[in-house]
Image (cartoon, rainbow, N blue to C red):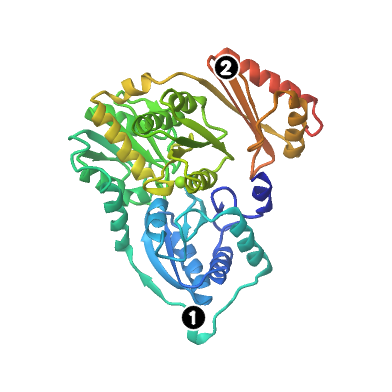
Amino acid sequence: MGEKKAGKRLFGTNGVRGVVGEDMHPGLVLGIGAALGSMRRGRIAVGRDTRTSGPALVAALKAGIMATGCDVMDLGVLPTPALQYIVRGRFVGGAMVTASHNPPEYNGVKVIDTDGTEMGDDEVVLLEDRLFARRFEYAPWDRVGTQVFVPDLVREYISGVAGRFSPDTGGGLTVVVDPGSGSGCLTTPDILSRIGCRLHTLNAVPDGGFPNRAPEPSEEGLRPLAEMVKATGAAMGIAHDGDADRTVFIDEKGRFLEENREFALVARSLCEEKKGTVVAPVSTSRIVEEVAGGLGCTVEYTAVGSIYVARKMMELIAAGRPVVMGGEGNGGLVYPDHQFCRDGAMTAAKMVAIVAGSGKPLSVLAGSLPRYYMIKEKIRTENARALVTGLVRHYAGEKPDLTDGVRLNRDEAWVLVRPSGTEPLVRITVEARREREAAELLGEIREIISTLPGSR
Ligand code: MG
């Protein structure tokens, strides 16, 4: 898996991203459209988030696709999971113009397969080959594709998510929704009111300038949401990133719920209902494993990236193994009975169902989870791979997990060191029951790294 990741030149774990006017421009996106269209025959769905550069980039994407003879259905502004939901089984592919949680000056493209999942590494490498070689299958004049604009199709997604819950699920619970001026504005408030919530909204008008907070739903950026939760006496605050595939929560006391704890809360609820496997990347807190294990479920680990989680879930299900859910410790959770991608509105609705169903405040539910202490750090290096190889050799006796980078699992602590996909650095994640143990393990790893060639 790591090898294929390395085989990709342009696409990262979540598509192509760049700063608009610098490395992200219509010329590049036109090529992505033409490459995608050259690999497909039929109708391709296209959508975008609320970014100011979206219309220009979507126009280029559509031009590239249509020039190859594929037809385009333009779904307008919608969340990435909504596009994925609509693509599944109905289109030969999809493309979403979004830079997810990145700042407003960024934009990018996520390419979606016919099954609604993000395009896998093998196909992405083929797409990149075409793009770099400019090997496009342009259609003659009488077979150039057409386009239709269908912004109403997003309603199918709204009904699809809301329809999974009974209309009184929320039981009149008051919630504050902050889609951060992103594409979740068009879906989540509607979905939550359909399942019986009373709503207040914040930053719920689409605006590509993201005037009030960054698209990343950080604890810092969500202070106004936390204040509004307290001021209105709401049961929780619900916030999305720019394309609403991720959701984070503020409890009724105005406190940010760390995303691994969010994952564990949802996993605890789902593992009570169903036994099977929870799929998560190796960077996930052990809290999920402890919660799932306590309920007779297991955790299977993948490389870092939601696509690896989604594909592992599909692989297990194809092999006849029950899968409870998948997720990442960043508020991106995947529900196999719904679709195989992160879905922010589903996560919002699930949390409403969990809190309303338990009759307990979110802070009490979260407070009953086991506690772990996590430290994240980056070390700059020009030779991240050599550094990881050195660590693998040094710790060979501990039989490290090599799913993505190198992970050492000890009784009370673990550490993951992996090269960044986009920058010259390694990312270190350490977790232990107590702060002191986490700091000690981080110190040990830092010291070993300093002795390795490539550390400077
Ligand atoms: Mg996102």
Q: What residue is disc 2 on? A: 412
Residue 194 image offset from top left, x and y in percent: 21, 46
Please name whichever residue, 392 or 272, is drawn nearer the observer in this view of the structure: 272
Q: Is residue 381 visible?
A: yes
Q: What residue is disc 1 on? A: 144
CA separation, marks 1 and 2? 61 Å
Q: Quadrant of residue 264?
A: top left
Q: Residues within 10 Å of mark 2 (few under 14, many from 20)?
A: few
Q: Is residue 235 visible?
A: no
Question: Which dot, 1 or 2, sits closer to the camera?
Answer: 2
Quick one: SS at disc 1? Answer: loop
Residue 266 image offset from top left, x and y in percent: 38, 32
Mark sitting earlier along the chain (1/2): 1
**Residue pictured at 51% horizontal, 43% vertical:** 309
Quick one: SS at disc 2? Answer: loop
**Residue pictured at 80% horizontal, 25% vertical:** 451
Please name whichever residue, 325 or 182, is drawn nearer the observer in this view of the structure: 325
Type of amino acid at the residue the image marks with label 1: Val
Type of amino acid at the residue the image marks with label 2: Glu
Question: From the viewer's perspective, is residue 102 above or below residue 132?
Answer: above
**Lateral position of residue 244 relative to residue 236, left or right:** right
- Badge 1 residue CB within 8 Å of ligand 1: no
**Lateral position of residue 97 relative to residue 303, left or right:** left
Residue farthest along the bottom direction in this orientation: 142
Question: From the viewer's perspective, is residue 31 above or below residue 15?
Answer: below
Residue farthest along the right direction in this orientation: 453
**Residue pictured at 61% horizontal, 17% vertical:** 439
**Residue pictured at 42% horizontal, 77% vertical:** 146
Is mark 1 in CB contact (under 8 Å) with mark 2?
A: no
Q: Quadrant of residue 174?
A: top left
Please name whichever residue, 187 or 221, is drawn nearer the observer in this view of the structure: 187
Residue 375 image offset from top left, x and y in percent: 57, 24
